[in-house]
Image (cartoon, rainbow, N blue to C red):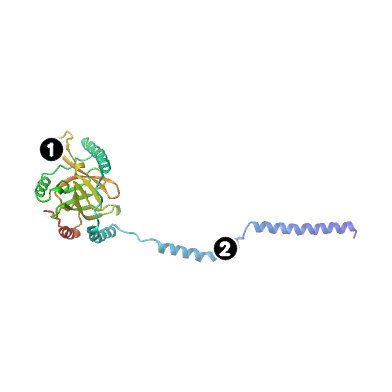
Amino acid sequence: MTRKTIVLIAAFVALGTATVGLVTAIFTQRGPTAQQQQLAAQRTAPDDQGKKLAEQGDSPPKTTPQMQAIAARTAFKNSLALNAKEKPLPPLNNSDLLHIKSAAKQQIDQSLGLAGVGKLGPPPKLDKPLQSFRNQWAKTNPTVTPFLGLWYDYGFTLYPSYLSIFPSRVRGQVCVLEFTPQQTVAAEVLVEEFLSLSTAKVINGQLLSSRLRADKSTIVQTDFDNGYPVDYDYTAEFLPVLWQNGGIGIVASYSPPQLPPEFPQDLTSQVKQELSNRGCTMD
């Protein structure tokens, strides 16, 4: 064998080794084979199943409207003693009053405008029985009389809520009951039931509780006439309220103070007793 032949054979051997290395590298870069993937899936399957079970166990149970109503009543019962001890909010200042009057005028004008063209029902009439009730209490507790009555948020929210302000045998004091009935559609709760009872002081014409404030100078009595028969030409009364969170609500007087419509019967006796304990009455 010549020297030239030996060199050629060595070159072919080197080329074969390089080819094998290249093919091995290509398969390595493509990742595991189908068999390897199947084995890996079998090893991880128990972990995935355990994760699914854990996720199912962590999901919160669904609440029903009945459960939410029970929770609201429980919270109300627990809050009665707390509200009795809460201090009233500070008096309204001039800036507060200007803000309340401006917002109230805008909201009232808008609602009466809609009612005037039939796009909203007429506001409640300033009730003669309510006026008689106030006149009666003016003899013994005159400072609170402008605020007395059952009020509701006519035309200002989609769902009704009520504010009933009861007189107290303690001069310069009232009891304030807030109530929003639960609203459900197809078992879905749109508005949660809300209940609150607090004691308020009336000082220098301002009603001050732990949850809201109002001033008698902002009460609006206005004539309403939408061009219909004489029955629709009357006086309506509105009370602007500044809530604890800074929001402004407008409520219209409806009747002498009483428990609102749709009020839970299972709480009626307890609320009446609580009113009595605080020196307040519906009479």
Viewer-proximal residue among 236 and 94: 94
Viewer-proximal residue among 245 and 232: 245
Image coordinates of residue 278 in percent, x first then y, are 17, 58
In the picture, the disc for residue 38 is 2
Residue 10: which quarter of the image?
A: bottom right
Mark 2 or mark 1, which is nearer to you? Answer: 1
Image coordinates of residue 155 in percent, x first then y, are 23, 42
- Residue 39 vs 209, above or below: the answer is below
State the quadrant of the N terminus.
bottom right
Image coordinates of residue 158 in percent, x first then y, are 27, 45
Secondary structure state at the residue bearing disc 1: helix
The reply to whether callout 2 and callout 1 are in contact (CB within 8 Å) is no
Task: Name which residue type carries label 1.
Answer: Asp
Residue 8: which quarter of the image?
A: bottom right
Secondary structure state at the residue bearing disc 2: helix
Graded by Cα atoms within 10 Å as few (under 14), some (14 to 19) or many (20 or more), the crowding at tag 1 reads few
Task: Name which residue type carries label 2.
Answer: Gln
Disc 1 target residue: 231
**From this viewpoint, which residue is outermost toward the top?**
227
Image coordinates of residue 12 in percent, x first then y, are 80, 57
Mark 2 and mark 1 lie on one chain; the one further toward the N terminus is 2
In the picture, the disc for residue 253 is none
Viewer-proximal residue among 210 and 59: 210
- Residue 197 vs 45, above or below: the answer is above
Graded by Cα atoms within 10 Å as few (under 14), some (14 to 19) or many (20 or more), the crowding at tag 2 reads few
**Number of marks drawn:** 2
Q: Say whether residue 27 is left or right of residue 281.
A: right
Q: CA distance from mark 2 to mark 1?
A: 84 Å
Task: Identify the residue at horizontal 83%, vertical 58% (top origin).
Answer: 9
**From this viewpoint, which residue is outermost toward the right?**
2
